[in-house]
Amino acid sequence: MSDASSGRRYCSNACRQRAYRSRSSARPDTPRALLPTPLDSFVGRREELAALAGLGSEHRLVSLVGPAGAGKTRLAVQHAGKRTGQVWWAPLASASDVVRAVYQAVGAHPLPNRSVREAVITEVDRHRRPLLVLDNCEHVLADAADLVSELLARCPRLRVLTTSREPLRLPGEQVFAVGELGLPPADIDVLTALRYDAVQLFRDRAVAVDRSFVVDGSNVANVVAVCRFLDGMPLAIELAARRMTVLSPADVLARLGDPALLTGGPRTADDRHRTLHAAIGWSYDLLSGAEQSACRRLAVLGVPFDLGVASAVCDVPDALDLLTGLEQKSLLVVDRAAGHTTFRQLESIRLYCHSRAAESGDLPVVADRVVDWVCSVVEPEISRFFPTPSAVLLLDRNIGLLDLAIARTTELSDWSRHALTVVAQAWTSTSAGPRGASTSLLHRALSQEMPASYRSVLTALAAMHHRVRGDWEVTRRFALESLAIERSGAGRPGTLARALEVLASAEAHTGNPAAAWELFDEAVALLRASGDKLARGVLLNSYAWTLVQHGFADLAAPLVAESLTLVRLLGLPHMLNPVLHTAGALALARGDFAAAVELFRESLEVGSEHPMDQFYDLEGLALGLVGVGSDDSRALSLLTAASVVRTRYDFRAEPYWQALLDEARSVCRSRIAAGRLRAAESCGERMSLPQAISYALTPAVADPGGVISAREMHVATLVAEGLTNRQIGVRLGISQHTVARHVTHARAKLGLRSRAQLAVWAGRHS
């Protein structure tokens, strides 16, 4: 038999029918319009869509995984809608039978004496390039994984896309994490902010309910703050933006802790997406009892935490499996920095879990666990001259827990453990604040009854606290109390040396240097006998710094050399900062200004882990630059920036050092032209401490010689006057975006790292 139209020959009608069915199944599919049809616009996610398209073309199983409200379903709709070929959409949110839901989605037909699963497989296998989307799999993961595994094995042309709050965990599965929308930094102008997806979404949804709404200079900071508080989660941002009918962005920001704020989604949305509370509750209800307890307890912390803290709070030997499970269910975010892993909850999830913790009575339990953890870190260290760097680093990384521990011990009047929590705070610092506890906190703790060993360490810390503020008589009083406790028979060389050291520095500055040298010598002898090399290095540096201030530079030199050797041999670069400062001060005292500049620059580089400790180094570098006579404008900017830090935190320079600073300022003001003088001081006043450190470490730039354009030079001059991009645009009649481009180009051509550096450069060259 033949088929004249195609030139084909067949042996029978049955053969012809089989060939027809084969050709039909191999034909390109015509997509069926089964995708959800959103009524509002799709905002952003351009990079995610491109990456998803590439991943989907290479792999047969892709899972969009993310927390509640991340926009997984919307991203899947957008991706599937751009695809050619047959697409099936199977919504599983309300399904209890996965196979039946897929059967209905693919339009399968009953087969005689065959199961529903076989009917699905038969229908799927008919198509050339089909895509099956399983939306919201988290509550039927096992059944979904079982079906997908069989479909992929028996339908070789099939590709599957799932959305879920955790992956299926099948071989070959590609997990595509759907996280926050692009978030702008906190301090940003309107035009730049509107380039970020989170701000675009807020504006789009706000305009949908209030056509008059605009993001402008009056509200951009609050809009950005709302988006950042909500971690860039699309559902949360949409719900917040819908409040623009009755609230301003500032009002929304002020009420973000109220769960009732993020409600009122579209009436057509399913119940889970009409309120953020319900969306997160859906995930929470799917957890095991242990996982729910962990979510509640970790929410009470309110800050990022590490594995050790999580184990203590959850009251388990090792919380690794718990944290792993919660991360896979998109209820924890993992952050990795400098080789250290921390975990955190998205703020919307944390607020929900915190409310559940309050209902379950977990708040005091968690506070007690935090107190236990803090005390376990501090207690072994209080008998040492100086806490081990590992203990300090551990406390620094978890500094956000200390306020909770201090508040809990105060509430319980547990003054012994309260003392340990105050000690922990005195040992810590952040990039935004100086090391140490507040004056009121130290004095309040010392007014309570506590063991003598705790009182000794607290009085020593109080003495150190007042030392950096120039209160030498108060320093001496607290140091004497600590020394009396240690001499009473405690038998702890480390803490005795600590009391001797702080008292020695006080004696030197209250008119009794001879007694100071005797106290220092006794402390050095104790630590040489103890074998604690780090403590000896720290003590020798303090001794040398005191000698330099009192005119004994030659006696200080061997102490500084030994201290530097010890700290370098111990491999603790961040501990070099104070020792290098003393070495730089010694070089200044000897008139070797070039060496001083190099030492202070090295100190700034190695001290980056605790930048709040570095204002001394900025001053030292400035003194060296003035001595060399190479860059007076830079020196004056650094002196001004350091002075701002001192004023903010009431850190008073020692008389010796203050005299050097005053003389350097006087020299700078006499040698800098009037026009550049104000620019240098203004730049120093505006720079943050990190910016000042970056500026100090940036090599000086020579005269541009035509490197930057006249317009870029004009813009840089206006930057030096303190004008914002918007103000410069108004002055020059150009857009804010164009101003930003000129600033960026000028910085790139001149090799400058920041706007502050450009301002100083322009002040020197305009």
Image (cartoon, rainbow, N blue to C red):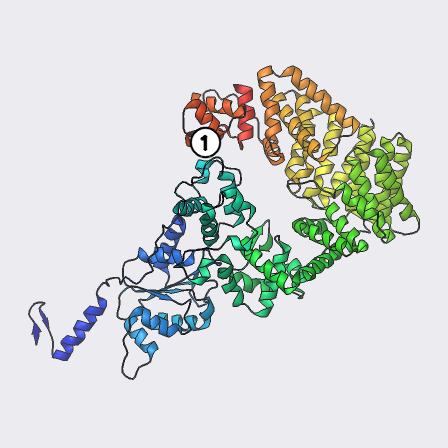
Q: Position of residue 76 (x, y in %)?
A: 38, 58
Sort mark 1 into few (<14), some (14-19) or many (20+) by Cα contacts within 10 Å: many
Residue at the far bottom in the pictured view: 113
Q: Position of residue 329 (x, y in %)?
A: 51, 63
Report the quarter where the N terminus lies: bottom left
Q: Is residue 278 left or right of residue 103?
A: right
Q: Is residue 414 left or right of residue 163?
A: right
Residue at image position (65%, 39%) is 611
Q: Secondary structure at mark 1?
A: helix
Which sits in the foreground, 87 or 700?
A: 87
Q: Is residue 588 left or right of residue 242?
A: right
Q: Is residue 423 left or right of residue 758?
A: right
Q: Which residue is mark 1?
A: 740
Residue at the far front in the pictured view: 246
Q: Is residue 155 visible?
A: no
**Compared with residue 211, is residue 369 higher up or lower down, i.e. above or below?**
below
Q: Position of residue 714 (x, y in %)?
A: 46, 21
Q: How many marks?
A: 1
Q: Quadrant of residue 75?
A: bottom left
Q: Is residue 669 visible?
A: yes
Q: Position of residue 289 (x, y in %)?
A: 59, 69
Which sits in the foreground, 438 or 570?
A: 438
Which sits in the foreground, 570 or 549?
A: 549
Q: Quadrant of residue 318?
A: bottom right
Amino acid type at image mark 1: Ala
